[in-house]
Amino acid sequence: MNTTYCPSLTEYKRRLSREVKIGDLPMGGLNPIRVQSMTTVDTMDTMGSVEQTLRMVEAGCEYVRITAPSVKEAQNLLEIKKELRKRGCTVPLIADIHFTPNAAELAARIVEKVRVNPGNYADKKKFDLIEYTDSSYAAEVDRIRERFRPLVQICKQYGTAMRIGTNHGSLSDRILSRYGDTPLGMVESALEFLRLCEEENYYDVVLSMKASNTQVMVQAYRLLVQKLDAEGLQPYPLHLGVTEAGEAEDGRIKSAVGIGTLLEDGLGDTVRVSLTEAPEAEAPVARALIDRYTHRAEQASPIPPVVSGQLSVVSQQTSIDNEQLTTDNQPPTTDSSPINPFQYQRRVTREVLNFGGLNVPRVVVDFSRLPGLEYADLRAAGHLYSAFLDKFQMSDLGADYLYSGQQPVPFMLPNGLRELVDYSAWLDAGQRPEHYPVLTQAEYAAAGVRHPALNFVFQNLASLTPPTLAQLRDDTTVVIILYTDNAHAMPEIRRAFFELLNHDVPNPVIINRQYPALTPEQTQLYAATDVGGLLLDGLGDGVVLSTELLPERPKAEWLTTIDELNQLSFGILQAARTRMSKTEYISCPSCGRTLFDLQETTAMIRQRTDHLKGVKIGIMGCIVNGPGEMADADYGYVGVGKGKIALYRGQEVIKKSVPEAQAVDQLIDLMREDGRWVEKEFLEQPVAG
């Protein structure tokens, strides 16, 4: 199978897409990556929509999307547009359409772009499994194409752009019956519509493959690029987004894991970060993700191709003449990598103590720069000490290992926490069995004495020479700590993983990233991209995040930073779906269709349920994407009418019309019936140290 999906796996090269004009602001080609968001005000509230749009533009939005669930909202887009233009705001407007082709056809005459969802534009979703013959399936496709054709012709006539936006949560019963709930189904859903666009010689198209599951989302975008090339279709621009990402830190981490992974490989022409917050809060996050790549090519160090030929470095085409952007004229992509980029499979490793094998990825917290470690300081690693009881309690975000560097911890650590020390300190401390040494490559090559069960060895791509690879392969006690100083960090670490794969080195690997002189917000987004992108490909058995800030900082500041990095590590593992350590909320960002206050409701549900480790709760403002997008959630809370909520167990509706005032209590009652509910008071009991 052809697994190529980007211009280069080793150099930063942005995919050259077709340029699409959206009003006066083109997308794709050599244009910058654009920022966009979506209003949350009722579309019939003209002045409210205008004021919110102006705030979004001021925050950095270059395109603004507005929902048009029916013809009346589509018609009111004209009034919104008139008022914006009257105020001197020329931002291109995008109509968001679900279920209603007549609304799309009207909106296409008014705004600069329409977004249609192929899963529900002229198709249906009732979670029915339908048996199709090839002829009956083809007949359904023809029916849908004929319903879609008028919109294509109107867009072509009026110069209106279109986004064909597949949502993982709203794949039709027809697609699900043939392709299953898969990235391939998402891609095929869009391609059915795209093929008709090309038949009509209409090319002002943008594509998206959104999902709340970051693994599915990344796989679908990669597969889409591969399929476009394989079918000889135009290289259309990509709209990147993780749908229903949630709020606050979790929403930002999850968005960065999905969006950042694709940006690293040069994919993406516009970004929308979907947060359960005011839409003007989304644009700065999107901009922070995008700006990291503005000078990436100049800042990055060269990464050599794989000697065995799995990778090749190619030149990037610079022409943006759309007439020349055929498959034959596209730059060649990289050859196949040792992993399948379209399907998650964790790298097979040997088990070393509790690393690798079938163990979850481990979290290591770096205390090496903290002076005078005390019992209470371990709170920053998720281990809470009670002086009154002389006991430790480990939270759900309790780190697995502590790295103390040259200063071994002067007291006994609590159960559940183990210690890494530098090799020289390990020797000086008498090679204590509860200490595990950390060696440089030079120390490892020369060391005569090592721990009999577990040793950690720092490696980077340059140090993975054939003799080193052979030594590592034969050493059943080594866990590799993989690091890089390259600005193009994630691809270089991935390239190092490829060396391990190509030489059959089965040692577990901890991903180590250090972020000097960054703000906490930048560190959050960058680490989620660098580490999360590797985890999505099944690479990595642990993570350690560090900062290089000056050691003379006050101790309280150090502890705050360590605590933030520990929580960030667990957040990245959860967002990449590789270790579930806390409650997950799959909550939509709200829009004009929303039937309750999403931010307030999400905060209320979180306040009462955030102690339920590993439980996934979907919180959806309306029925459009709700049941599907929260398909892998354990429970769902979905608006179905004014003041009315439907409660789900998985994809099954359990209660159809619960008064909003009672809905959270009844959601908890449902968990209690299933034996999934635990009282917070029970969890707060300390455990022995």
Image (spheres, rainbow, N blue to C red):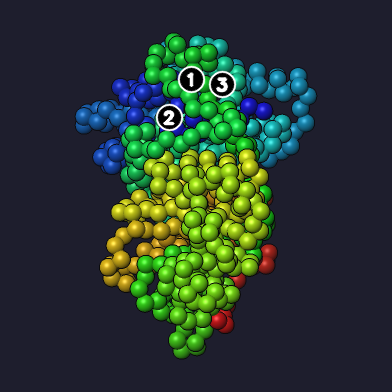
Image marks 3 and 2: residues in contact by CB distance under 8 Å: no
Judging depth in this view, the residue of 106 and 114 nearest the camera is 114
- Give the numbered dot on residue 229: 3
Mark 1 Cα shell of 10 Å, populated few (<14), some (14-19), many (≥20): some
* Image quadrant containing the C terminus: bottom right
Helix, strand or loop at label 3? It is helix
What is the distance, in whole Å, between disc 1 and disc 3 at their CAs?
11 Å
Which residue is found at the position 35% from the left and 50% from the top?
A: 522
- Give the numbered dot on residue 331: 1
Judging depth in this view, the residue of 673 and 91 nearest the camera is 91
Amino acid type assigned to the residue bearing label 2 in the image:
Lys
Amino acid type assigned to the residue bearing label 1 in the image:
Pro
What is the distance, in whole Å, between disc 1 and disc 2 at their CAs?
11 Å
What is the distance, in whole Å, between disc 3 and disc 2 at their CAs?
17 Å
Image marks 1 and 2: residues in contact by CB distance under 8 Å: yes
Residue annotated with mark 2: 13
On screen, residue 273 above or below 387: above
Q: Nearer the viewer, mark 3 or mark 2?
A: 2
The image quarter in which residue 19 lies: top left
- Tag 2 or tag 1, which sits nearer the N-term? 2
- Give the numbered dot on residue 655: none
Amino acid type assigned to the residue bearing label 3 in the image:
Asp
Mark 3 Cα shell of 10 Å, populated few (<14), some (14-19), many (≥20): some
Which residue is found at the position 40% from the left and 62% from the top?
A: 564
- Tag 3 or tag 1, which sits nearer the N-term? 3
Which residue is found at the position 43% from the left and 22% from the top?
A: 316
Helix, strand or loop at label 1? It is loop
